[in-house]
C-alpha cells in the first residue's frame, strides 16, 4: 500500500518541480528583460514607460473587475462589457460638451447610464438563458456586443466617426527628474483606487456582498437560504457596469479620441488581465490589469513596430498563462463535487 501511495505521489512531486522550474525560468527571464530595457534607453525612459503602463492598467482594472465579478457568479464571459465601457465614454462626452458638466458629474452620469443599460441587457438577453447551456449565453453575449457597436454607430445615435474628446479641465504636467506626471494620471489612479476600495467594502462588508459570495459559491443552496439569486446577479451586472462606465470616462480623458468601436480591444485586454490575475478573483483582476497595461506600453516603447505588435503580445500573454498556470496568478483550481 505504501509503495502504491509513493508511486502516485511521485508524479505530483515531479509536476510541481517542473512547474516551479518554469516559474523560476520566467522570473529570471523577466528580470533579464527589465535590465536589458533599462540599459537600452536608460532608467528615466524605462520608468516613464512603466508609469504610463500603470496608468493604462488602472483603466483596464475597472473593466476587468466587471468581467471577474460576473464570471465568478454566473460563469459567463460578458463580451458586451467593453461596449458598456464605450457607452460610458460617450455619455460623459455629451454631458461635458452639450451641458458643460464638470468631470465628477459627468463620470457619475456615465456610471448611472451604464448601470441602467447593463441591467436591461441582463434581464432581456441573459436571464432567459440562465439554465441554458453556457455556449448559448456566450454566443448571446457576442451578439449583444455587435448590436451595441453597430447600433451606436448609426448617424442618429453616436455615429461611426472618430470624435475628439474635450477634457473638462486643463492638463497640467509635472517634471520630476525627467519623468513626466500629469494630473490625468493622478485623477485616474485616485479614482480607480477609490472605486476599488468601495467595491471591496461592498463585497466583504455588506449583506449584498455576502449574498454575492454565497451565490458564487453555490446558487441552489443560496436560494434555500432565502437569497434572491436573480437580484444578486442583476446587482453584480450593475456594479460591473458602473466600474466600466467610470473606466470609459478615464480612458477618454487619457486618450481623447472616441469611437463606437473603442471598447473592443480594451475589453479583450481587460479579459486577458482578468484571466492573468485569476478570473473570479477581485485582487487578481486588479494586479493582472496593471501587468497588462505595462506589457502594452513596454511593447510600444521598446519593441520595433511595437504599436502594431502590442495586441499580439497581449494575447501571447494569455496563451502563456493557459500553458503555465491556467488558473492565473491568484486563481485556485476548482473542485468538482461528485
Image (tube, rainbow, N blue to C red):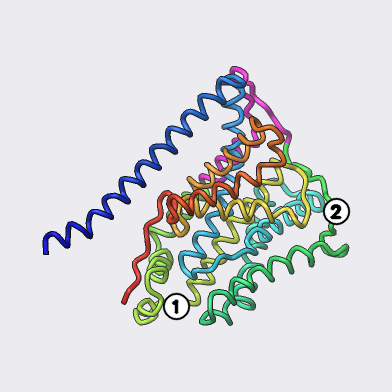
* Between 333 and 251, the one nearer to me in the picture: 333
Q: Residues within 10 Å of mark 1 (few under 14, many from 20)?
A: some
Q: Secondary structure at mark 1?
A: loop
Q: Identify the image quadrant of the C terminus.
A: bottom left
The residues colored magenta run: 170-193
191 relative position to 225: left or right = right
Task: Please provide percent x and percent y for residue 275.
Answer: 50, 54
As for residue 179 lying within the magenta part, the answer is yes
Q: Earlier in the sequence, mark 1 or mark 2?
A: 2
Measured along the vertical axis of the image, is residue 125 above or below residue 154? Answer: below
Using the image, tell me which numbered label, if any, was put on residue 161. Answer: 2
305 relative position to 31: left or right = right
What's the CA distance linking mark 1 and mark 2?
43 Å
Task: Please provide percent x and percent y for residue 8.
Answer: 23, 60
| Label tally | 2
Residue projecting furthest to the right? 155
As for residue 152 lying within the magenta part, the answer is no
| Residue at the image position 75 percent from the left and 43 percent from the top | 256
112 relative position to 25: left or right = right
Do labels 1 and 2 touch, CB within 8 Å? no
Name the residue carrying label 1: 228
Amino acid at each position: 500500500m505504501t509503495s502504491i501511495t509513493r508511486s502516485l505521489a511521485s508524479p505530483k512531486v515531479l509536476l510541481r518541480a517542473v512547474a516551479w522550474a518554469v516559474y523560476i525560468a520566467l522570473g529570471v527571464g523577466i528580470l533579464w528583460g527589465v535590465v536589458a530595457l533599462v540599459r537600452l534607453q536608460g532608467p528615466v525612459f524605462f520608468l516613464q514607460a512603466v508609469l504610463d503602463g500603470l496608468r493604462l492598467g488602472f483603466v483596464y482594472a475597472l473593466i476587468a473587475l466587471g468581467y471577474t465579478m460576473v464570471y465568478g457568479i454566473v460563469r459567463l464571459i460578458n463580451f458586451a462589457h467593453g461596449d458598456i465601457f464605450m457607452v460610458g465614454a460617450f455619455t460623459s462626452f455629451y454631458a461635458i460638451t452639450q451641458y458643460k458638466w464638470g468631470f465628477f458629474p459627468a463620470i457619475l452620469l456615465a456610471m448611472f447610464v451604464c448601470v441602467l443599460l447593463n441591467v436591461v441587457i441582463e434581464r432581456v438577453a441573459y436571464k432567459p438563458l440562465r439554465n441554458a447551456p453556457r455556449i448559448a449565453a456566450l454566443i448571446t453575449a457576442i451578439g449583444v456586443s455587435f448590436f451595441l457597436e453597430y447600433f451606436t454607430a448609426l448617424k442618429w445615435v453616436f455615429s461611426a466617426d472618430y470624435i475628439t474628446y474635450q477634457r473638462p479641465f486643463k492638463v497640467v504636467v509635472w517634471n520630476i527628474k525627467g519623468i513626466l506626471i500629469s494630473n490625468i494620471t493622478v485623477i485616474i489612479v485616485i479614482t480607480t483606487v477609490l472605486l476599488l476600495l468601495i467595491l471591496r467594502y461592498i463585497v466583504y462588508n455588506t449583506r449584498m456582498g455576502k449574498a454575492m459570495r454565497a451565490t458564487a459559491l453555490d446558487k441552489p443552496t443560496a436560494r434555500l437560504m432565502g437569497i434572491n439569486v436573480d437580484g444578486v446577479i442583476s446587482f453584480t451586472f450593475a456594479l460591473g457596469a458602473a466600474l466600466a462606465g467610470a473606466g470609459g470616462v478615464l480612458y477618454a480623458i487619457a486618450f481623447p479620441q472616441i469611437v463606437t468601436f473603442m471598447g473592443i480591444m480594451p475589453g479583450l485586454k481587460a479579459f486577458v488581465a482578468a484571466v492573468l490575475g485569476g478570473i473570479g478573483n477581485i485582487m487578481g483582476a486588479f494586479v493582472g490589469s496593471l501587468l497588462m497595461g505595462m506589457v502594452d506600453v513596454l511593447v510600444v516603447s521598446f519593441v520595433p513596430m511595437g504599436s502594431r505588435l502590442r495586441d499580439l503580445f497581449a494575447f501571447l500573454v494569455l496563451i502563456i498563462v493557459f500553458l503555465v498556470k491556467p488558473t492565473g496568478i491568484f486563481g485556485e483550481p476548482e473542485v468538482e463535487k461528485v
